[in-house]
């Protein structure tokens, strides 16, 4: 029997009373650990976090809580090697892909520690200047932001067990709001281990950070009016969260990061052989292969002028032919595994659906694996599909295949490209490639309303741009419509979700005593 990973709730470690759900190594198929939340006293767990954890965090100022984040960074850095081992074993990722998750998490926490420190020794945040409510400045309205007096529940996806926790926990803890995280089950081990290390190091107040691994049953039922819930996962589960009574009847604030049919757009000036054309090819291949395409921000649709469709197909395919796939422990392997056999089946099903309306331009789905048994490993090589009639290929704009799969689409002119990008019905990110700064800027503004982020790659930023799919804490993450309508990160904007805005209407003398910077 493998270890049953304990949950941390009510200020202590508690194992579930059931047999547990096994977590597997997706490459060699061995069982690694089990998770279970059966029998936990959830009302007591949420009360403890809300009352004990919340009060302790709110007693600290912003810069003191920033100090807590800095202490968490130190703990995680100390144990970093063990996180890489868990990621290799449980997520099947090569070292570079594990870094996106683990080092991305530590970097994001470090940023919030720095920004939080600059907020100073205060307990509420000024929101604009006081405005007079009458003719004379004797009675004014001062808006401010105060931490919500509830708990933040995170229901997370399997693909970012480290970053998915800390990119949310950093702004929540900095805001003074305690966190309860329920990781995606298949990769819960890394989240659980990180929480274990931080709790055992004693750097956070009791109740500030809890972890519940296993079933999500009953979690949403615990939420009360001042709590918030942040969900990352599929659109289907997102719809369940949104329609839960806690949200519908108790006005629990909700943030949803769901699936997204992100695009990359090659502008007409970027003909084959130009730097911009080559930059698109490089970025598409990177996005298809990093974490085996299991990134919510990965490029799913590649929009190119019809005249360069064939050249783009050939250039992308040529690079994909060089991608080695298999056991991440073998140094020659560039792309590791999907997270589970279930995920592999889902990718194969999605591929079959897309193939009904597309042609296969590069087929890595049957390629030989390095050091891995195709009957056991959840590995699949990259697949590039194509459709010259981009309007007719409905499924490409509708089905997110969460793996190393993308579709090349031909457009007539820039307006057509913009219309096709919009058919994703709201996406996390689109990237533009070209050398004409004016055309890039005009197209970026056209796409901004339907995308959380527009990543513009011109040759002058070839070495410095941060990557289409890389979520930087300084920039907004989240997209409208299909992408869930959420908003995370974006520097201190992330704190909004964990705060309540209020207007204090009073005399200047009273307002002077609010303790705002
Ligand atoms: P999922 O099946 O929707 O699961 C997400 C989380 O919800 C898991 O923790 C899951 O628990 C939990 N869950 C399942 N049913 C639930 C219910 N009825 N009530 C409450 N929680 C429930 O998604 P996934 O397969 O893990 O993740 C892949 C998807 O996430 C992709 O579509 C991807 O695009 C999206 N994603 C989006 C972002 C973003 O930032 N926009 C980031 C990463 C991933 P179990 O694991 O125990 O089932």
Image (cartoon, helix red, strand yellow):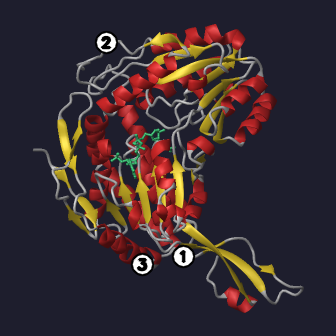
- Residue occupied by mark 1: 121
Q: Quadrant of the C terminus?
A: bottom right
Q: Point out residue 230 in the picture as x, y percentages from the top left corner.
A: 48, 56
| Mark sitting on residue 55 | 3
Q: Position of residue 501 (x, y in %)?
A: 63, 72
Q: Secondary structure at mark 3?
A: helix
User: Which one is in front, 252 or 294?
Assistant: 252
**Which corner quadrant of the figure contains ligand 1?**
top left
Q: Quadrant of residue 380?
A: top left
Mark 1 lies on a secondary structure that is loop
Q: Is residue 434 above or below residue 217?
A: above
Tag 3 near tag 2, CB within 8 Å: no
Q: Residues within 10 Å of mark 1 (few under 14, many from 20)?
A: some
Q: Quadrant of the N terminus?
A: top left
Q: Earlier in the sequence, mark 2 or mark 1?
A: 1
Q: Tell me if residue 14 comes above or below residue 348 in the rendering.
A: below
Residue 5 lies left or right of residue 209; in this view the side is left
Q: Report which residue position mark 2 lands on.
A: 368
Q: Point out the frontmost of discs 2 and 1.
A: 2
State which tag comes first along the sequence, 3 or 1. 3
Instruction: Classify residue 390 by image quadrant.
Output: top right
Disc number for residue 150: none
């Amino acid at each position: 029997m493998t270890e049953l990973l304990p949950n941390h709730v009510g200020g202590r470690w508690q194992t579930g009373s059931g047999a547990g759900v096994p977590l597997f190594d997706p490459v060699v198929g061995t069982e690694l650990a089990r998770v279970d939340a059966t029998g936990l006293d959830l009302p007591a767990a949420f009360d403890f976090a809300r009352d004990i954890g919340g009060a302790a965090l709110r007693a600290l100022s912003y810069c003191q809580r920033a100090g807590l984040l800095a202490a968490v960074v130190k703990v995680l850095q100390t144990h970093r090697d063990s996180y890489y081992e868990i990621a290799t074993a449980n997520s099947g990722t090569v070292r570079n892909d594990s870094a996106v998750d683990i080092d991305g998490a530590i970097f994001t926490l470090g940023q919030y520690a720095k920004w939080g420190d600059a907020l100073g020794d205060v307990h509420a945040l000024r929101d604009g200047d006081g405005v007079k409510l009458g003719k004379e400045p004797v009675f004014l309205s001062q808006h401010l932001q105060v931490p919500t007096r509830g708990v933040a529940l995170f229901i997370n996806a399997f693909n970012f067990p480290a970053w998915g926790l800390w990119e949310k926990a950093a702004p929540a803890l900095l805001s003074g709001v305690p966190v309860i995280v329920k990781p995606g089950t298949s990769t819960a081990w890394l989240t659980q281990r990180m929480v274990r290390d931080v709790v055992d190091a004693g750097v956070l107040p009791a109740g500030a950070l809890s972890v519940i691994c296993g079933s999500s049953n009953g979690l949403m039922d615990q939420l009360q009016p001042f709590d918030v819930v942040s969900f990352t996962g599929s659109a289907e589960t997102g719809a369940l969260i949104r329609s839960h009574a806690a949200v519908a009847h108790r006005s629990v604030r909700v943030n949803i990061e769901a699936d997204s049919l992100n695009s990359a757009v090659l502008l007409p000036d970027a003909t084959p052989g130009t730097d911009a054309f080559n930059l698109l090819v490089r970025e598409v291949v990177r996005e298809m292969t990093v974490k085996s395409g299991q990134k919510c921000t990965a490029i799913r649709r590649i929009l190119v002028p019809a005249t360069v469709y064939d050249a783009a197909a050939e250039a992308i395919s040529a690079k994909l032919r060089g991608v080695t796939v298999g056991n991440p422990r073998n140094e020659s392997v560039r792309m590791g595994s999907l997270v589970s056999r279930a995920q592999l089946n889902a990718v194969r099903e999605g591929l079959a659906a897309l193939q009904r309306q597309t042609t296969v331009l590069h087929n890595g789905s049957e390629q030989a694996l390095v050091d891995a048994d195709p009957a056991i490993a959840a590995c699949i090589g990259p697949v590039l599909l194509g459709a010259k009639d981009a309007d007719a290929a409905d499924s490409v704009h509708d089905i997110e295949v969460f793996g190393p799969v993308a579709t090349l689409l031909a457009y007539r002119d820039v307006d057509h490209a913009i219309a096709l990008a919009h058919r994703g019905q709201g996406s996390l990110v689109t990237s533009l490639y070209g050398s004409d700064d004016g055309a890039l800027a005009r197209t970026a503004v056209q796409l901004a309303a339907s995308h959380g982020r527009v990543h513009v790659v011109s040759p002058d930023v070839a070495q410095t741009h941060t990557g289409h799919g890389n979520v930087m804490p300084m920039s907004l993450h989240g997209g409208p419509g299909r992408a869930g309508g959420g908003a995370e990160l974006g520097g201190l904007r992330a704190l909004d979700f964990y705060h309540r805005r209020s207007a204090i209407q009073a005399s200047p003398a009273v307002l002077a005593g609010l303790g705002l910077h």
